Image (cartoon, rainbow, N blue to C red):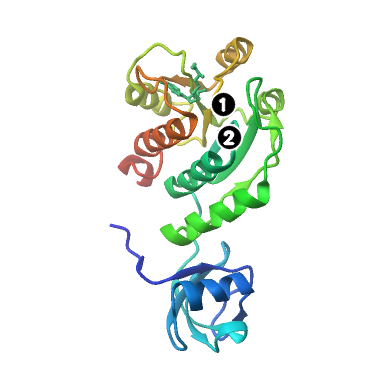
Amino acid sequence: MTGYDFRSPRLYVDASLKEGAEVALDSGQANYLCNVLRLREGDGVLLFNGRDGEWNSTLSGAGKHARLKVGTRARVQTVAPDLHFLFAPLKHARLDYMVQKAVETGVSRLQPVITRHTQVARVNLARMRANAIEAAQQCGILALPEIGEPFDFVKMLRTREPERLLVFCDEDAEIAGPVAALEKAGTSPTRAGSPLAVLIGPEGGFAEEERAALLKQPNVVRVSLGPRILRADTAAVAALALVQAVLGDWSEAARE
Ligand code: SAH
């Protein structure tokens, strides 16, 4: 059960939220509420800003003068599970998709990593943020993920937090059940309840030296996603679902 109102329109805003506040809308937000959703004066909109929880509000004015009057709080602020998503950036539509799906599955940080075979040199972080906001708006997520400046593979290894279990999705891994591999990694006494990261490579796959370097690292679990090579965006969804189900906040054990 989700336990929240997922039918009302929801809007992310930058402004601080508290009862009685008035929130001005930019032209994109006004257009979305008044023209796309066709809301009228007095209609309800749920608001969140990633900090103050979720608030009921009502629309007043119209067009350029539309604004929202904040009423009572609907939900207190939640924190995202401590799950970092490390990924080689993809081109436009596939990156949009991957970012949206990662946010929907509940990651707390989106971190582009430039690997040897990554074909995308420049990552549009503003676009990533817009996709993250859209996914959060649609899926009732109150905590927006952090978005990291891209860094290269070497820096990823150098700056790794030793206690964060890294789930390395390796297209070359021997085929073996990923659930058992994750369970084993997650229940070893040193790792129980540890923060998590999932790493997905580029469409060109990992280079041999990258694979070798990863396998030398402590606290890495190498995972196969089955006998077929998945496209990177599909692999991301599959891996995040597995990790959330076995070690993350989809699992009973993690919530106890
Ligand atoms: N071009 C590469 C495939 C890369 S797929 C090749 O043909 O070998 C992109 C990324 O998705 C991979 O780096 C890996 O992180 C993930 N991935 C895809 N299929 C996978 C599988 N069967 N098992 C584990 N990871 C997989």
> Does residue 256 sit above or below 44 in this rendering?
above
Residue 87: percent from left, percent from top? 57, 33
Spatial CA distance of label 1 from label 2 is 7 Å
**Mark 1 Cα-neighbour bin, 10 Å: few <14, some 14–19, many ≥20:** many
The local secondary structure at tag 2 comes to loop
Query: What number is the disc on residue 90?
Result: 2
Query: What number is the disc on residue 160?
Result: none
Q: Quadrant of the N terminus?
A: bottom left
Query: What number is the disc on residue 202?
Result: 1
> Does residue 53 sit above or below 212 in this rendering?
below
The verdict on label 1 being within 8 Å of ligand 1 is yes
Q: Is residue 21 visible?
A: no
> Foreground residue, 243 or 99?
99
Which amino acid does the dot numbered 2 rest on? Leu
Tell me which residue sits at (44%, 30%) in the image. 235
Residue 90: percent from left, percent from top? 58, 34
Which amino acid does the dot numbered 1 rest on? Pro
> Does residue 24 sit above or below 239 in this rendering?
below
Q: Is residue 3 visible?
A: yes
The verdict on label 2 being within 8 Å of ligand 1 is no
Q: Earlier in the sequence, mark 1 or mark 2?
A: 2
Tell me which residue sits at (56%, 76%) in the image. 30
Q: Are marks 1 and 2 in contact (CB under 8 Å)?
A: yes
> Does residue 76 sit above or below 223 in this rendering?
below
